[in-house]
Image (spheres, rainbow, N blue to C red):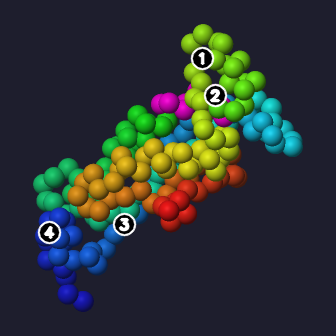
Amino acid sequence: MRARPATRLRDHFATNTAFPTMRITRRLEFDAGHRIPNHLSQCRHLHGHRYALEITLVGGVIEAAGRPDDGMVMDFSEVKAIAKQNVIDAWDHAFLVWRDDRAVADFLGGLPGHKTVVLDAVPTAENLARIAFSILDPLYRDSYGNHLHLERIRLYETPNCWADATREDLA
């Protein structure tokens, strides 16, 4: 097997669409409350979870000797910073409420300084994963010039229950 000569990643993408890609995943956790107002069991009550959000990105491994991102798809600290600023900080220790859940939305709206996030969808794991994907997708897209893109958001509602939002499913 011949060794591939070292070149800059951007040069590879300009000439070689078969350049190997890599998937990376960063996991972040946050606490939030919600309820599923029309649920037939316990989830219709106000309650909270220790959520975990996994962000999976796909892109070429950067080959740029001397740069701090050499050998990476994206620096994990930057993956974290983008997700934290745009999703985690907004949802952490907040109550996630569906706009049409008037009883709870109105009650929370009357609490001075309460951290409430009003959503256009019922705050199920599936909807939260989809919403997080739509928020984060444009923020990661090709930010390193290595065809970087968001592949999947996995949102754990509990350690045993999660929902995946993927580009393929949401297209």
Q: Report crowding for label 1: few under 14, some 14 to 19, many 20 or more residues within 10 A (C-alpha).
A: few
- Label 3 residue SS: strand
How far is disc 3 from disc 2 in space, using C-alphas? Answer: 36 Å
Q: Position of residue 41 (x, y in %)?
A: 86, 42
How far is disc 3 from disc 1 in space, using C-alphas? Answer: 41 Å
Horizontal arrangement in the rendering, residue 17 relative to residue 98 (left or right): left
Three-letter amino acid code at disc 2? Answer: Phe
Q: Which residue is mark 4?
A: 11
- Label 4 residue SS: helix
Residue farthest to the right, as pictured: 40
Extent of the magenta region: 89-98
**Which mark sits nearer the N-terminus, 3 or 1?**
3
Q: Mark 2 touching mark 1, by CB under 8 A?
A: yes
Residue farthest to the top, as pictured: 112
Q: Nearer the viewer, residue 138 or 67?
A: 138
**Which mark sits nearer the N-terminus, 3 or 4?**
4
**Which mark sits nearer the N-terminus, 4 or 2?**
4
Three-letter amino acid code at disc 1? Answer: His
Horizontal arrangement in the rendering, residue 22 relative to residue 46 (left or right): left
Q: Position of residue 25 (x, y in %)?
A: 45, 55
Horizontal arrangement in the rendering, residue 76 relative to residue 167 (left or right): left
Q: Nearer the viewer, residue 32 or 132?
A: 132
The mark found on residue 77 in the picture is none
